[in-house]
Image (cartoon, coloured by chain):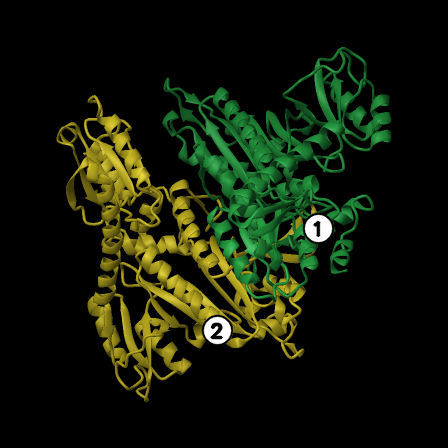
Chain colours: A green, B yellow
Amino acid sequence: MDNRKMVNDITAMDEDLAKWYTDIVKKAELVEYTSVKGCVVIRPYGYAIWENIQRILDGMFKDTGHENVCMPMFIPESLLNKEKEHVEGFAPEVAWVTHGGNDKLEERLCVRPTSETLFCEHYANIIHSYRDLPKLYNQWVSVVRWEKTTRPFLRSREFLWQEGHTIHETADEAICETERMLDIYADFCEQVLAMPVIKGRKTESDKFAGAVATYAIEAMMHDGKSLQAGTSHYFGDGFAKAFDITFSDRNNQKSYPHQTSWGVSTRLIGGIIMTHGDDNGLALPPAVAPIQAVIIPIAAHKGGVVEKARELEKTLGAAGVRVTVDDSDNSPGWKFAQYEMKGVPVRIELGPRDIEKGECVIVTRHNREKTTVRLEAAPAEVVKKLGQVQDGLYQRALQNRKRRTYDCKTTDEMIEVMDKNGDGYIRAMWCGSEQCEAAVKEKTGAGSRCIPFEQEAVSDKCVCCGKPATTMVLWGKAY
Amino acid sequence: MDNRKMVNDITAMDEDLAKWYTDIVKKAELVEYTSVKGCVVIRPYGYAIWENIQRILDGMFKDTGHENVCMPMFIPESLLNKEKEHVEGFAPEVAWVTHGGNDKLEERLCVRPTSETLFCEHYANIIHSYRDLPKLYNQWVSVVRWEKTTRPFLRSREFLWQEGHTIHETADEAICETERMLDIYADFCEQVLAMPVIKGRKTESDKFAGAVATYAIEAMMHDGKSLQAGTSHYFGDGFAKAFDITFSDRNNQKSYPHQTSWGVSTRLIGGIIMTHGDDNGLALPPAVAPIQAVIIPIAAHKGGVVEKARELEKTLGAAGVRVTVDDSDNSPGWKFAQYEMKGVPVRIELGPRDIEKGECVIVTRHNREKTTVRLEAAPAEVVKKLGQVQDGLYQRALQNRKRRTYDCKTTDEMIEVMDKNGDGYIRAMWCGSEQCEAAVKEKTGAGSRCIPFEQEAVSDKCVCCGKPATTMVLWGKAY
């Protein structure tokens, strides 16, 4: 009864996906709303996921020679204005501080929407010679963008992220860095978040404000829509010129350095929900799950059950598993539903009869598979199961993407495919003109997500104008 | 030559302590200024210290059952206004956001100067029953206070900190938490930062805005002034009443919960500088030093020297030491001065003659003591030395505090002592009246730092009015 009630509290995905999403973030206690629109409280369970993401990614950054710094949160208006394209892209959506205490400020300050301008000001101060290069910097902060429509994790006015900002002697080195960081993001998403991604380049119309080239990883969500999960930008020397950052090169000539920036955010948590969740709630990849295994004592009032559960908790903990025992007075059925809803990858049931037989029952969240194992074998078995869940989630998501990826030769075909199958990725050729890109979006509703690095000719003509085309574009709707 | 030049770049402490401080934060590359007054860039070396502080403190918080969360950075004006004393304390020094993009906001938002109001709003949403209590929350964020005079780390408009906010069933439990967190701060400062502190209670006039009681740890800096290194506040149920946070207690009665908050900030880095630094620069406690040992090859151009240094780096790293080799083409003398300035606790000199003899030379930063050891014994010896540095720094700071702590019976005596010896701590009795407290400050320049938990009667009369007094107060000037 309890069990059913709990699950019924979550709107079914098929019924209303947006409502399903909101139910999950609230009921799994990931976030809570506040009186400031578009700004949420990230609650302990949600923040613990972010801490795991941070810890693992930060390690990957440091292993590749990056250092953390912290820039101020405020950008003076005149500083934001220095790079023309950049300010045009961001000024319409920044929050402005106009007063400090009771005094009006001489110059308005915006709350950083991203920190290129601050890093540039800093680089101009500290870089003089090629010996000062490269600088491979990163920061973990929150940024603010005054969005009209908001949704926890996926699009909020304030969000947590990391932003890498690097500066190099040569264009080659900077391009290399841009690509390296995209690879790190892709590896992280696939191996840690179990979220398959497609690496590609954004079209000109979709570039970051001020970039020469923007690369992105795109992940397909449950409903066939695409989530831009991370971006990596190559700036050339445009920012260096706008901010007058120069250095004496190896020939003692004054030279402009080349820059990059790259970021992922708490949006990844939205991606996890929309990739792995189901009608029973969240399903967390073990690598970032705050609780990897929950032990639920059955008939806990009976002598020795809770003690045995605590014992098992210890041996699992010693095996490196993030484990907890729920010995609260809720019913086992309620607990099953509760931890399924919270996406805990593995549940372990332990009752008097199991203990008598020296066994316990392991249930994996994503497929509800049950395995009975000897208690002494439980730690090794749970570790193995966690690996299987990690892989199982990835394979399921990959299958979903494969099933919903279509090759089309004309926009009519695109419309037909989407009418029949709903959203998804459409692989179709593009001549490279911005008009065709815009026309495809207008006709089909699907925009260019990226020009995948892995190219494969679907035809030899542009899906829109029919002229010869050699570039395959991934089209789809985006979050 | 290089050596002398480097050190000469730092103003002597005796000459101008403020300038000495600024020289260190800049030249040791802890911070760099920006175009926003009072907001600095925390550079990699400074941020790495903060990361070590965070990692260790966060572990202490989690070991005592605290969970991390993340609140929004914005507080609507009406929310800030809910608790009368609190808003009076903070409104004069907050930064106000008035516009989002091109639109004027309906209600101004302040950038959090501290987050009690946000936590209260959240608690009102999520707490219903005694079963929901306690909540032991913490967040690592930056806050903004529009200070008039600023100084990197010690007082800045934006600073990084952690703020703990807990809520409890009973007053006793909350008071217990307030004291427990003060103890954790004191242990952290003494054992990790090698910074002796005095635990005590703030007088009424010096309490946090909205608190029933404020506890603090006070640390004496080089110059005899006091740094408030951390605070822990007990709120009673005042905030709960202002924000209408109620719960059904164990008797099913509506009841108000009791709250606390507590915080330390990047100010601790300022404390490290002002406690341990000297005319040669920084001196970092090994527990938070980004580099604990630097290996400097002598005559590095000679065959095998750099290779041997790298080998030693590996064995030291394996022994858990944060170690690096500087094989750049600067002179050894320049490097000695450079790493002394950056406060690296241990330097290891390794030249061809040392290698021949199978030895290396270990020099400890704070006392320049030299030890020659066998290479195979180096890892164990370095670990031992790091322990000695940690303890040596603590003892030196403790001696400084003892030497500069005086007992006085009258304000005239206070003035005389300070005239003769400069700043320091004065232990003197207080009758408890706010007038006397203010009068002492006006006459002597020394304010009440705290009422130490460890009381010892210095006399039986108030230092100011001469009436009977049983409370010993620690008086001094503050940062």
Q: Chain under label 2?
A: B
Q: Residue at x 22, y 23 (%)?
A: B304
Q: Is residue A162 left or right of residue A125?
A: right
SS at circle 2: helix
- Rendered image: mark on residue A53: none
Crowding at dot 2, Cα within 10 Å, few <14 / some 14-19 / many 20+, comes out as many
Q: Chain under label 1?
A: A
Question: Are discs 2 and 1 located on one and the same chain?
Answer: no
> What's under tag 1, amino acid-wise?
Ile
- Rendered image: mark on residue A24: 1
Quarter location, residue A457: top right
The residue lying toward the viewer, choosing from B155 and A283, is: A283
Q: Is residue A289 left or right of residue B2?
A: right
The residue lying toward the viewer, choosing from A32 and B438, is: A32
The percent position of residue A62, horizontal first and vertical second, equals 45, 36
Label 2 to label 1, Cα distance in Å?
36 Å
Quadrant where the C terminus of chain A is found in the figure? top right
